[in-house]
Amino acid sequence: MRLSWMIGGAQGLGVDTSANVFGAAVARAGYYIFGSREYFSNIKGRHSYFNVLLSDSPQHSVNSTVNILATFDAETIFQHYDEVTDFLIYDKGVEAMTIDKVRSLEPEIAVKAAAILEKAGLGISIADVVKFLEKKGVKCIGIDYGPLMKDIINQLKMDPFVAEKARNMLCAGASFGLLGLNQKYLLDAIKSTFKNAKIAELDTLAAQAGFKSVQNSYNLKELPIKGHRVQLDGNTISAIGKLYGGLSFQSYYPITPASDESTYIEANQVLKTSDGKTRGVVVLQTEDELAAINAANGAALTGARAATATSGPGFSLMNEGISWAGMNEVPVLVTYYMRGSPATGLPTRSGQSDLLLAVNVGHGEFTRIVIASGDHAEVFSDAVMALNLAELCQTPAIHIIEKTLANAYAVMDEETITSGKFKIERGKLISPGDPENYKRFELTEDGISPRAPLGHAHMYYTGDEHNEYGHITEESENRIAMYEKRIKKGQLVFKVLQENQMANSVGSSDTVILTWGSPKGAILDAMEELKAKGISVQMVQVRLFSPYPSELMAKLLSGKKRIIAMENNYTAQGARLLTENTGIKPTHYVLKWNGRPMTKDEVVSSISDVVKNDTKKVVLNEGK
Amino acid sequence: MKVNEQLEFNDWCPGCGDFGILRSVESALSELKLDYTDAVLVSGIGCSGKLPHFVSGPIAGVHTLHGRALAFAVGIKLSNPKLNVVVDAGDGDTFGIGVGHFVSAGRRNVNMTIIVHNNGVYGLTKGQASPTLKRGEKTKSLPEPNINDPINPIALAISSGYTFVARTFAYNIPLSKEIIKQAIQHKGMAFVDMLQPCPTYNDINTNEWYKERVYEAKVDYEVKDQSEVIEKMNQAIKLAYPSDEKIPLGIFYKNSLTPSYGERISANISNYEDYYPSMQEIEESSAPITSIDSMVQARRVV
């Protein structure tokens, strides 16, 4: 089962909080959750929404439609009414509001929303939307938010300005009531979310009032739970993965949607270790991304596991520093939160348009490790893996996490990250026996030299071409040897990674959906529905993009009837890398570049279209 | 024949101020008994950037990127606070492409030293005007006189929060060595404005030109009480804008009362100085040893 719930409202009015509480409450009743957050580059006032998918099994995507649209303002209704299938929860106090009065509504959306209503012979007020929806069979539940909130405010004698913000929880309470689950789950979730007793009481009363306003409609049953489950967003799970993987230095410059990772690390910078010690992680907020990458480079030279986190604009600035790291064989990790490009682009929306930038970042030819995670569990394991690969190969590593994953949360089994199956591999990190005659760039068979931290040996680093000691030389034969060293070291990656860490293959079919990153979730969630329609597909999700696993990809894709490249960009960059490295070309394309995540329904409809009609290219556009 | 790891020569122009700076740095390191075990020389790009490669004796050198030496240095120092980090960078490097890092390093008061090789030109790219060249001056390879106003490095350092600010002249090796030693020993961010002739491209500010103007200023530069900070900063800035043609050398400002960045980190991480990032154990027989239990449990929903 998949039930889609969406809550929307003005940024700053608790949309996130209510979605987190609602999700936690549903999770307490035994359901798995995938929650996706969409918001403007704005702090207060613009429309933001949270789409929560609940299910009896782990989910990784959202739907194109919503079963329950939970609202406490007019704008959310105008934005999303055409997506609702079952219930609209709305404020009776805004019934008279018309589309033209909502100034924060983007004009393009206002025109579209009005056109649908006018075509149905209706006006453009919320009351008209309600009529429109009722006709479609959607039940509209009008709640008198104003009087209900007034009662609570009087009861608690609170400042109305503060208390009015609990409308979000009233809305969440009403939503929860529709599900038919025991109210205690919601109240428990509120209690553990709000530490301030007065606020907890306020939100409890609001949730109860909402709960009472509706009737059980879905009749959901509590599900048995084995072990613990955690609710984690992509930023947080990346941070935890890096810390677990031994990170001890993180530099960053503020940028959406990357900064939350760094601030989380700083908030948790004192860590206990199993040898009875505590270790502190230095988090440095730098003056710019040039400083962020190069401070991380410096930290890595001392032997610390060092990283930075950024997004497109910052990553562009890091080019030169990453090039230096390649030249000097520095194990540094860049966690790359990919958002809508180019330039400032869509700073709070998602995209996969910078993959080719990541694999080519920095001037010059050298090994860059580039890996891309497809879901929250992979974000964790890839963070550890990226730190390992950087150090094993002594070269910069880039870990791509799209905004779609960064700001989405998943409820997952705790053992996914605490199973103890993860390893830390530090490669040829040494303290040399003869530190005065140490050669930092000693030529070796595999291209990787024993690496001593600064302070442990007489040594030199330089961005100029250098000899084994790290001194500048422009001599031709040395140049040839060092150049080759920096490239051939990448081969080690193929020896240490398992096949599914390079490319993840699910199912078996002569129709392959070739993808990477977040579309993985929508594809996996769609496979069953496709099968029921008689369409069997195999998903091949590339996780390692540099060095490229050409042999494995050729093995996985040779002889396939259809290879459908499915990506969140215009030119299918992941597929271009496949062609460049193997000569294999996709037969079909399903592409989406509107900044919104791929939905399960889009996968079903587009793949059906490709398979049934041999449509060569499908362009997707769901999501507000 | 074996190619030694020590370079036996260097490739600066004859008469370059860098020779004097190299000698001062070497002597300071040697008198402070610093080598690769406890010191790192970090440099930028340009003629000055090559300095670590030319130092005799076993040191560690990190020749970085144009403008970014300080950024690297901060990362090195914060990860291993036991290392004495000395940055050598040019005036274009520090006050042009890297000026943001210069200001930010002052704000943090990181316990390290930057020596800026200040010769008014971009030497290694054939003599363009640097941010310290005066407006109206036309050095040898400029097509027209410089139309930018110069930065005053001392005033910029003071206003950025540097807690040790000094100026010396490349060919006054005894003074330069002494100032570098004090800068290294200072607990905080130290800046040494190293005036230097460029015999190839700066035909105005020559060795002789400097020798006619430089003198050792004797001022009471040290902040002994918090109440003196503004007064001593003003004094240093005034000295940096002399009313005559003379160029004062020496220590302009010193404040040991401002907490260093390491001390600020220690306020959040109590064992930072004893168990800093570069020495931390993170695995045992490849198994991670960092506990994430509290973070994971905080996100438990059931």
Image: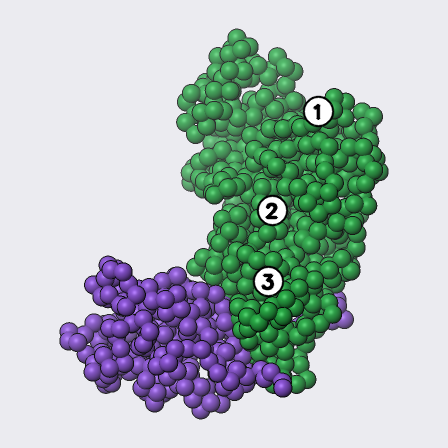
Q: Is residue A59 visible?
A: no
Which image quadrant is residue B143 in? bottom left
Q: Position of residue B294 (x, y in %)?
A: 65, 59
Q: Is residue B247 left or right of residue A227?
A: left
The reply to whether dot 2 and dot 3 touch (C-beta < 8 Å) is no
Q: Which residue is mark 2?
A: A356
Q: Is residue B31 visible?
A: yes
Which image quadrant is residue B110 in? bottom left
Q: Position of residue A312 (x, y in %)?
A: 53, 48
The mark found on residue A326 in the picture is 3
Q: Which residue is mark 1?
A: A615
Q: Colour of chain B?
A: purple
User: Which residue: 63% across, 85% down?
Assistant: B2
The mark found on residue B268 in the picture is none
Identify by letter the chain in green.
Answer: A
A322 vs A143: above or below:
below
